[in-house]
Amino acid sequence: MTTDAVDWEWDETLYSGSAAHYSVGRMPYPSSLADAIRDALGLDGTGRLLDVGCGPGSLTLLLAPLFASAVGVDADAGMLGEASRRADEAGIADVEWRRLRAEELPVDLGPFRVATFAQSFHWMDRLLVARRVREMLAPDGAWVHISATTHRGSPYAEPLPHPPPPWDAIGDLVAEYLGPVRRAGQGHLLAGTPGGEDDVMREARYTELTRIHIDEDLIADRDIDAIVSSVFSLSNSAPHLFGERLPAFEAELRGLLAEAAPDGRFSERVVPMKAVIWQP
């Protein structure tokens, strides 16, 4: 890890048990994000996509039709299993899934037209990864960094058709079971995940091409199962962290949600997303 996260080291349990909860608990990236990236880069169905820290393939599968082929890279076997399942379900065949850490790149993957990082770069040795991926990009290649929040909606979002999930109370409940300091794998994130991606990219000799803002007025209607899965999709409340207390936590969580919305229906406004495109 870089010096901005010296209190924590990555380990393979970071998202252990979370993969199956993504398709239920995470709101999908909107098609308008893919359209904006396509238009900004002139994508025409040729070239290759590399999605680093792809998780269960949420972004990979959205963008794959814009390329001739795609490769999704992740260190978590469960995430890649879920990604493969979702690709089969969607009938998307030209995607290869590789289990490895971003720090192990470039291995034998070859050149790419675009490399994407969505809600993943902060877990990595960022300068090292930026430099290594730079070597993997084709002469007309680009790096796309996507900032998004998909496990929950905007806190500034009323009025809504249904009540928003009680996220503050959910956070308090997680803290009752796991303690007040954010958990992550076998360690703790005392200072949270690092920021300053722009500085890292410039140090790695990338030049900013453009910024894309996706700020649609989208409302997501969600049920209790979706909110429970959203909680379990997070690194700081991944199922393995609760150990033998997992059933008790889930029961309390469901009770809290049922009290907040007796009909089991919630609404949230989707948080605006940002993509920054860099060129080497």
Image (spheres, helix red, strand yellow):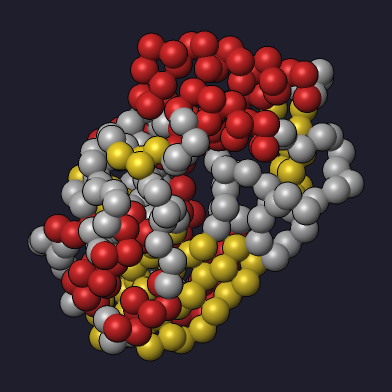
Q: Picture quarter containing residue 166?
A: top right
Which quadrant of the figure contains the N terminus? bottom left
Q: Picture quarter containing residue 250?
A: top right
Q: Which of these two is toward me, 29 or 169? A: 169
Image coordinates of residue 163 in percent, x first then y, are 82, 34
Q: Left or right: where does residue 158 sit relative to residue 55?
A: right
Q: Left or right: where does residue 91 sit relative to residue 108?
A: right
How many numbered callouts?
Answer: 0
- Visible in this render: residue 133? no
Residue at 36% in and 24% down = 240
Image coordinates of residue 227 in percent, x first then y, are 62, 30
- Visible in this render: residue 137? yes
Image coordinates of residue 46 in percent, x first then y, are 35, 71
Which quadrant of the figure contains the C terminus? bottom left
Q: Picture quarter containing residue 136?
A: bottom left
Residue at 30% in and 39% down = 187
Q: Residue furthest left?
A: 108
Is 217 rendered above or below residue 255?
A: below
Image coordinates of residue 274 in percent, x first then y, are 57, 68
Residue at 51% in and 63% down = 147
Q: Which of these two is toward me, 133 or 44? A: 133
